[in-house]
Amino acid sequence: MIWNLALKTRAYRYFGHQDVITGVQFSPSGNLVATSSKDRTVRLWTPTMKGESTMFKAHTAAVRSVAFSHDGQRLVTASDDKSIKVWSVRGQCFNYSLNQHTNWVRCARFSPDGRLIASCGDDRSVRLWDTSTKRCINCFTDYVGSTTFVDFNSSGTCIASSGADSSLKIWDLRTNRLIQQYQVHSAGINTFSFHPSDNYLISGSSDSTVKILDLLEGRLIYTLHGHKGAVITVAFSRTGEVFASGGTDGQVLMWRTNFDTKSYRDVLQQHGRRSTPDPPPHLSDIHPRVPHLHRPQSADIQIRPTVADTRSADPHVTERGQAVHRTTFPNGQTRMMPTQAAANSHYSNGLPPCHVASPRVERWKEGKCARGAGWTAGSEIGPGGGGRREEEEEEEEEEEEERGEMNPLEVTGRQSRLDSTLGHIVQQLDILTQTVSVLEERLTLTEDKLKECLHHQATILEDVRASGERRRTYSEGIDGSPHFT
């Protein structure tokens, strides 16, 4: 859904994807929206009343993320098929693929100058790619679990990456060194965002909190409580004045960025003055202010705001379910198709859609109605009139058959049967694709196990060789030692 943040809130709901949407991003100019989904497709939307979209197909598994380059000319996507793909926005075509990850790829992002791509995945690595040579130029593997998110700062000199082990790391690309590491969440970090000034960073986690980090002082300064479930996305506005967070609780919260206008030490001192049963410098949550048992507390400020629900009882939502979209395939072919809305979707006016018949169908219905009326009138006149009317109808039907005319409703029925057959074929193809994906996953697991076995065998062989060398040296020493009588 795309929201207008004016006072009279208006939202547009677009239908097109057949599975869960995993990523959404506006283009730098704001005239396009890119989305990725588990249905293995990427869509490029025009955020207007028409709701037109172009569908890109090249991945063979779920697409986890999508992002524009900073000039808005390219898209980069990451997928469970272990590949990263780059697309042309203007040409609406697939450009090239990057394949060195050994497991699912969670996220991929362009650098501000567009020369590099950073990616991360379930193989516990963060990779850096050169877009000109299409090669991996660096790999960071200092992670215990899967890496969940990666992004560049606004200057492009550093990248940050988060992991399922609740760690967040910042790397300096000029020296290829880890310069900062944070362990502030109690669960895995799903997303983060740099402030445009590069002085702050916000992170969202499965522990239902949003953390604000001061990168200049290298410390956690605020913890935001508002979501009732995992926080799956956070993002600053382009100016950094506000930021938004979204979670599995179905809420999107808008926050004002005022932590850069007031000194953190002043806020710390202000909250330290209030009465509390615990000794200073303990800081309690701002809301609610009630006594509680003493527990070890961190030096960050806990914020539990009263969230204003901007949703009305009956929000005005414009659904665009029949938008026409273009499908772009890897071979460059493009096909125009109508986008079908979900069958169980709700309409903004509460009424079901109207089915408008074609002029030919209307004329056919009028003819049938006229014939029926005439037949009734003839039957009322008498047997003779009814017989003449039946003879006239038989003659008209014979003339229609000679002209080759068909009942347009029969044509519509045949078309619906054809559509259902094609839909069944598409479902079977989807099942085959899913089967191939499962086989690929099992093959990956088998490859990993085989690598482990080979590694263990190599280790054992080295140990045997070392033991043989030690025995040989020991025997030579005994044989060459002098004997005294």
Image: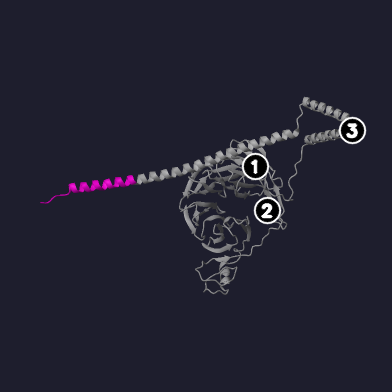
Read off the residue under disc 2. Answer: 3
Give the crowd class for mark 3: few <14, some 14-19, many >=20 residues within 10 Å: few
Name above or below for residue 156 compared with residue 55. Answer: below
Q: In this view, which residue lies farthest toward the left?
A: 485
Q: Earlier in the sequence, mark 3 or mark 1?
A: 1
Look at the image and give the residue range highlighted in magenta.
460-485
Name above or below for residue 214 compared with residue 93. Answer: below
Could you say whether the residue bearing mark 3 is in a helix, strand or loop? helix
Task: Find out whether residue 457 is within the magenta segment.
Answer: no
Task: Find out whether residue 470 is within the magenta segment.
Answer: yes
Q: Earlier in the sequence, mark 2 or mark 1?
A: 2
Question: Where in the figure is residue 162, as x and y percent of width and height?
Answer: 51, 54
Horizontally, residue 378 falls left or right of residue 197, namely right
Horizontally, residue 145 falls left or right of residue 14, namely left
Question: Where in the figure is residue 30, as x and y percent of width and height?
Answer: 66, 49
Read off the residue under disc 1. Answer: 54
Q: Are marks 2 and 1 in contact (CB under 8 Å)?
A: no
Q: In this view, which residue lies farthest toward the right?
A: 381
Spatial separation of the CA atoms under disc 3 and disc 2: 66 Å
Amino acid at pointer 3: Ile
Could you say whether the residue bearing mark 2 is in a helix, strand or loop? strand
